[in-house]
Amino acid sequence: MNALTLHRLHFAFTITFHYIFPQLTMGLALLILILKTVALRTGDEKYAAAARFWAQIFAINFAMGVVTGIPMEFQFGTNWSRFSKAAGGVIGQPLAMEGVFSFFLESSFLGVFLFGEKRLGPKAHWVSAFLVFAGSWLSGFFIIATDAWMQHPVGYVIGNNGEIVLTSLVGLLTNPWLIWQYLHNMIASVVTGSFVMAAIGAFYLLTARHQEYGRVFVKLGVVAGMISSFLMVFPTGDGQGKNVALLQPPTLAAMEGLFQTENGAPLAIVGQVDMEKKRLDNPITIPHALSFLTYQRWGAEVKGMNEFAADRLPDNVPLLYYSYHIMVGLGTILIGAMALASFSLWRGKLYETRSLLWLLMLLLPFPYIATTAGWMTAEMGRQPWLIYGIMRTQEGVSPYVSSGSALFTLLGFMGIYTILGILFLFLVGREIEEGPGG
């Protein structure tokens, strides 16, 4: 295995493991704020205790996110030094703003929220919850701004020595790719947070423990999950899909498994990619649906992979295609599950319907899988470009880090992160066992 492949695997592993944690903190930040708002409006201690419980889960995730996120950023210099040298003046701006403006805001007021409730009044404590939420979502904005620039670079010029010089910070922060990617990502974090909250609530109800809190968790998780799951599809998913169609047409063709340009292109629900014969095997399609979803016209032309040179197509079309369809398929299942749970909640039967409670509990890992598949779709879709249209992936790698060194550190990271994962599960499990108000 060559050094480039190992560097890519190294970064893929660390960022995939890292993102397990911030997606939950960003989703929980909103849900905790909702619990604190209800507590403030009603004066019901139950909601304040529920917010404190989830703040403990939030804090564990936040700490794990910091521990796994810092090494990931160092990899820009160790594994991708030529990329850092060329683009550091651009990506350094939003990454620095994330650290200075949002990370310190979030971490500082998380401490205030966790340890200052007895010293603060109810309104001041609510403000601390709001600032944790603001810091968390602002952090996501700056990180997504960095990735969005790599997907659709704007506001730059190429310097005399080949370096990329930022000419408009405003342009970077208002990148048309950024808006929909940010909203789609943050709504996905709410989906994750909602399913986790509903799953823990369902666990309490099924085991007949902390049942009053279990009902609160299930109700908020299902309502927030229903709303956010639909928002994932429209308008955020639709908007992001239009970005891909307009700005990365080879990616759209690969994601959809569309080998030939078609007027009234069908939408492939399932099928197996055959790159040798350039076709989908055993496809199940909806006629004309891809044209309509992309251009709002049933007969619109959608460019297939035949329109693009081989070096413009994503490196691994089958993996991109399957990742995208896993994301869409799981998203559809999650919407269906929340629709059933919402209907049962509306009828007043959800808390006693054990089959639906089991469903909510067992679905806990699937938002994580869907989000991972979504990020795989975004990042593999950009390939073979590290910075779309400017720098190819092989041009950004560190030239003097051997494959042996990359493999050694990758195995080391896997071992350390396995220990961290076990520690995380132990700490979260202990909090769940103790329960709210414990």
Image: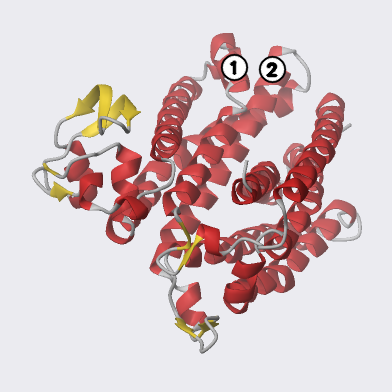
Dot 2 or dot 1, earlier in sequence? 2
Estimate the x, y position of residue 154 in percent, counting from the top left: 43, 75
Indicate whether 227 appears above or below 114: above
Quarter of the figure that contains the C terminus: top right
Q: Decide if residue 301 is in sight here.
A: yes
168 or 7: nearer the viewer: 7
Residue 180 horizontal side relative to residue 348, left or right: left
- How far, Cα to Cα, is label 2 from label 1? 8 Å
Q: Which amino acid does the dot numbered 2 rest on?
A: Leu
- The answer to whether residue 292 is left or right of residue 401 is left
Label 2 crowd (10 A; few <14 / some 14-19 / many >=20): many
Residue receiving disc 2: 205
Q: Which mark is residue 357?
A: 1
Whether label 2 touches label 1, CB < 8 Å: yes
Q: Position of residue 429 (x, y in %)?
A: 82, 27
In this view, 363 is above or below 195: above
Foreground residue among 357 and 139 = 139
Q: Which residue lies at the image location 73% right of the left edge and 49% below the top edge?
A: 406
